[in-house]
Image (cartoon, rainbow, N blue to C red):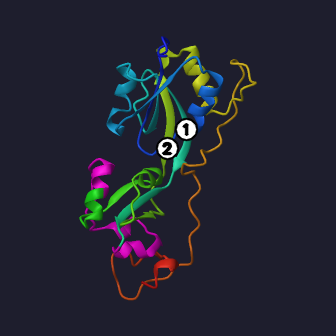
Amino acid sequence: MPSDVAPFRIAIVAGVSVGRWTKAWKERRPETPLEVIPIPESEQRSVLTEGIADVSFVRLPIDRDDLSVIRLYSEVPVVVVPKEHPIALFDSVTEADLAGEILRTEDPADAVEVVAAGVGVLRVPHSVARQYARKDVEAIPVSDAPETEIAIAWPTESTSPDVEYFVGIVRGRKASSSRGEAPTAPPPPTNQTTAKRPPQRGAKKPQGGGPAAAGRKRGARGSR
């Protein structure tokens, strides 16, 4: 039977997985249904100010006026390239290696399609590249690019018991904790990119030049 209780609405930008937190909510607050709303990054503030979502997982920076914002974790930046692109041979590349490449700026889902067809490359957080992963592209870490950050945000004036409860879950509050207790810092989601960069293998320059000559060659792919 449908519930007469209004759902608690959670907006998420691409790359964010909220399964562990929504599962905890359903176990602890089964009387209040959840609605998860995927949104483009361009709408991460408007979904809150227009009342479309109660909370939103956003990618910083965001205009914080009238919002409460709690930073959660960092993401490693990557470049998505076609599988046969010279950059795909490397464990990591630098900003300089990308000079002269055509950077795609479309929605990631569309941009990956274009990149796979051999037109340009895409710069995105690792979690976004993972969400749109396919067999004909590779995601290579950009070692000297700044990391991006994921946060949870909500309108300060709309802070409700439900908002406080969900934020507490995200920040690590146990089911036995009272609502007023200070939650512990959240452990990084197991299926998200954390602040640690992936280990890099020893540097090997490819024979000759190429757009990624300053990068780190992927040993596992060097035999192609």
Q: Tag 1 or tag 2, which sits nearer the N-term? A: 1
Give x and y (percent) for residue 180. Answer: 70, 18
Whether the residues at callouts 2 and 1 have beta carbons within 8 Å, the answer is no
Secondary structure of residue under mark 1: helix
Q: Nearer the viewer, mark 2 or mark 1?
A: 1
Give x and y (percent) for residue 87. Answer: 38, 72
Would residue 131 be seen by someone viewing this image from the given angle?
yes
Where 205 sits versus 79, above or below? below
Give x and y (percent) for residue 13. Answer: 41, 39
Q: Which residue is mark 1?
A: 19
Query: Is 117 situated left or right of 200 in this image?
Result: left
Image quarter (top left, top right, bottom left or bottom right) of the C terminus:
bottom left
Is residue 115 a member of the stretch shown in magenta? Answer: no
Would residue 215 be seen by someone viewing this image from the given angle?
no
Task: Report the front residue among 132 and 199.
Answer: 132
Where 166 sits versus 217, above or below? above
- Where does the magenta region start and end? 84-112
**Which numbered disc covers residue 149?**
2
Q: Which residue: 46% across, 78% down?
A: 221
Where 88 sits versus 16, above or below? below
Quarter holding residue 94: bottom left
Secondary structure of residue under mark 2: strand
Q: Which residue: 48% across, 28% down?
A: 153
Query: Is 119 situated left or right of 176 in this image?
Result: left
